Image (spheres, rainbow, N blue to C red):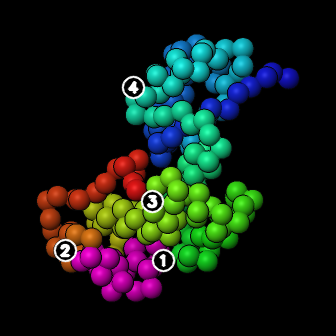
Amino acid sequence: MENSNVLYIKNMVCPRCKLAVKNLLTDMGCNVLAVELGQAVVSSRSLPAISEVANKLRTIGFDLLSTRKTKLVERIKILLIYDIYYQSCQVTLSQVQNYLELATHQNYQYLDTQFYSVYQISIKDYWDKLRFERAKELLSYNEKAPDEIARELGYATEDDLELTFKQNLHLSISEYIQSENNYRSPLNKLP
């Protein structure tokens, strides 16, 4: 069996990020065994110096993670992004807490404390920001009604989603839809 190294990588938020990391590592001569959001597994025999890998990753907007805490916090972010963007969203905070505890085998309070110590924002507030970004994205496609988007993302009502738009953008949902600026933030810039 081949020895491998797991590289933990910050800012991998979508399938294109996985492809970019895989291509970069392959171009560096690495035998890439697997790439997932937040990590890449490469053959130990083909791995260049870690500092070289870190420098190359930085050139395309990623960072190599080295501490246990930063790896855990990045995993939390990736789990939440994956859940909201690529699965059916956990629609209540209680479901999010259970989801994270099961995925990390850690107590939610511990996870929240670690997350806050790195980003100065709670997991719940980050989850709310992600849901809002996803709502803006879905509205910009103009394929689903606001009430359907609200329900899909776990807002109690369309009015709750409307209130979120007014609080964050000072626009109603209809004003947002009609606006030429989509006001979206890149996921790697949250929180």
User: Residue 44's quadrant in the figure?
Assistant: top right
Question: Between marks 1 and 3, how big is the CA–CA gap?
Answer: 24 Å
Which residue was labeled with disc 2?
171
Magenta part of the protein: which range?
146-167
Q: Earlier in the sequence, mark 2 or mark 1?
A: 1
Residue 41 versus residue 50 in the image, above or below: below
Kindly state the secondary structure of the residue where label 3 is placed.
Answer: loop
Question: Between marks 2 and 3, how big is the CA–CA gap?
Answer: 27 Å
Q: Earlier in the sequence, mark 2 or mark 3?
A: 3
Q: Residues within 10 Å of mark 4 (few under 14, many from 20)?
A: few
Which residue was labeled with disc 1?
154
Question: Between marks 3 and 4, how big is the CA–CA gap?
Answer: 26 Å
Residue 43 versus residue 6 in the image, above or below: above
- Of residues 48 and 109, the one nearer the viewer is 109
Q: Mark 1 or mark 3, which is nearer to you?
A: 3
Residue 88 visible in the snapshot: no
Q: Residue 158: say if magenta.
A: yes
Which residue was labeled with disc 4?
59
Q: Amino acid at mark 1?
A: Gly
The number of callouts visible is 4
Q: Amino acid at mark 2?
A: Leu
Q: Quadrant of the N terminus?
A: top right
Which residue was labeled with disc 3?
120
Q: Residue at x 56, y 76 (%)?
A: 93
Q: Residues within 10 Å of mark 3 (few under 14, many from 20)?
A: few
